[in-house]
Amino acid sequence: MTDEQPAWARRIRSLRRAHSWSQVAAVCELRRHADAALPSTEHLVRRWKDWESGKNRPSDFYAPLIAATLGTVTSALFPPEGATPAITPESEVLTATGMDTLELLTRLRSSDIDDTTLDAVRITVEKLCCDYSRRPPRELLVESRKWLRRLVDMRWQRLTFAQHRSTLELAGWLALVVGCLEYDLGDPDAAEATRRSALSLGEEVGSADILGWAHEMRAWFALTRGDYRSALAAGRTGEAVAGARGVSVQLVAQQAKAYARMGLRDEMRRALARGRAVLEALPYPDRIDNHFVVDPSKFDFYAMDCYRTVGEDRLARELSDEVARVSTGAGHGKRWPMRLAEARLTRAVVAARDGDLDHATTLGHRALEAGRRSLPSLLMVSGELATTLTHRFPTEPSTRDYLDALRSVRQSTR
């Protein structure tokens, strides 16, 4: 294999090896996912070798079968041409509506709100959702709260029924952003209150997406505090409300993570398969940088967490490499720094299990030093590394140094 080979070819080979399959075994697995009759095993093995070498790109028929066989999503293994995060430019409101922020704020204070003004607010709210993964959380929280207050104030202005509903819906999305940021910063009480507000707004406007994400937040909160049964319950409730939407994939992922931590591997695998099937059926999203859009590559992130937790280290390591690669896409800086931190922690846990203390603690410290982080999620995964280091290397100075650094981060949440 060479660097000139397509990324999909390298991934087919590395994922196949992570599953500990020969090429013949991989072809046998491929048959299990096919509804139609396939050619002979000898013929399929030749094709598989061509795919791994990058000689032939799989056809539209075989691409989803290969993705299903390897436990990923077609668009994650074979991204659409030119698919990159749509980083929202600061001037997008001006470009789309012809008004700058000052003019927008002036219009919001007027007695009548026109549709152009609402469009500008909608673009602003989406930009805040897209900024979630990268901007400093306290700075973004201040700005998001200001816009949320403005939207609440708009309820008392003269609005048409459609405008009133749009205002409430936008407030619901902002409440979700604010609640996520509050939880990231270690304020679970404020985050839960804001989540309930988002849930109420979602119910008022009948938005399955907002309702789904409000339940997903509840599942996330429960998972990070170790209440796995509550995480399962919230995930199931959210699924029932949301239906076949992107948020349902993340709701199922939270359930898979809970099952993994409960030691229920079969349930974990079934949950991952269910989430993969939902995501596979959805169109490729327009704005994958929006926090409330589940991009295909995020499925590998979910699976990485599950496989690390249950000790399937070869798969966890392979998926962590892919998560890290996607999270630091060339030309875009760090797309998803929080995913990158968890990928590093996954590599660290696997390294510690393999006996490589220096590599494990180096990666562990790098993850703790991440600038943009979600403290509860970071502490949950960092705690797994701490447990592994304490078990394998209880008296080593490097272990004590890592535990001290982790203790310092925990104290910062108080």
Image: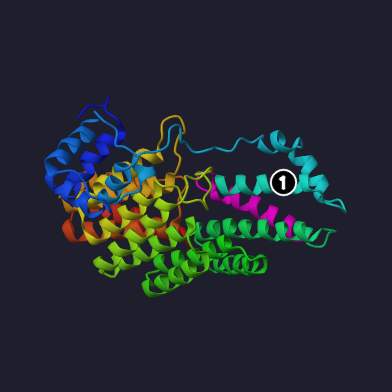
Any part of residue 293 in sight: yes
Q: In which quarter of the image is residue 384?
A: bottom left
Residue at the disc numbered 1: 119
Any part of residue 348 in sight: no
The picture places residue 196, in percent across and down from the top left corner, at: 59, 69
Question: Which residue is drawn at the image coordinates 51% and 51% (left, top)?
Answer: 293
Q: In this view, does 22 lie above or below 243?
A: above
Residue 137 colored in magenta in the image: yes
Q: Residue furthest right?
A: 111
The picture places residue 258, in percent across and down from the top left corner, at: 34, 67
Provide the major secondary structure of the magenta segment: helix
* Magenta stretch in the rendered image: 132-153
| Amino acid type of the residue that numbered disc 1 sits on in the rendered structure | Asp
Can you say which quadrant of the picture contains the N terminus? Answer: top left
Pointer 1: residues within 10 angstroms few (<14), some, or many (20+)?
some
Question: Which residue is drawn at the image coordinates 25% and 53% (left, top)?
Answer: 349
The picture places residue 167, in percent across and down from the top left corner, at: 72, 57
Question: From the viewer's perspective, is 211 left or right of 34?
Answer: right
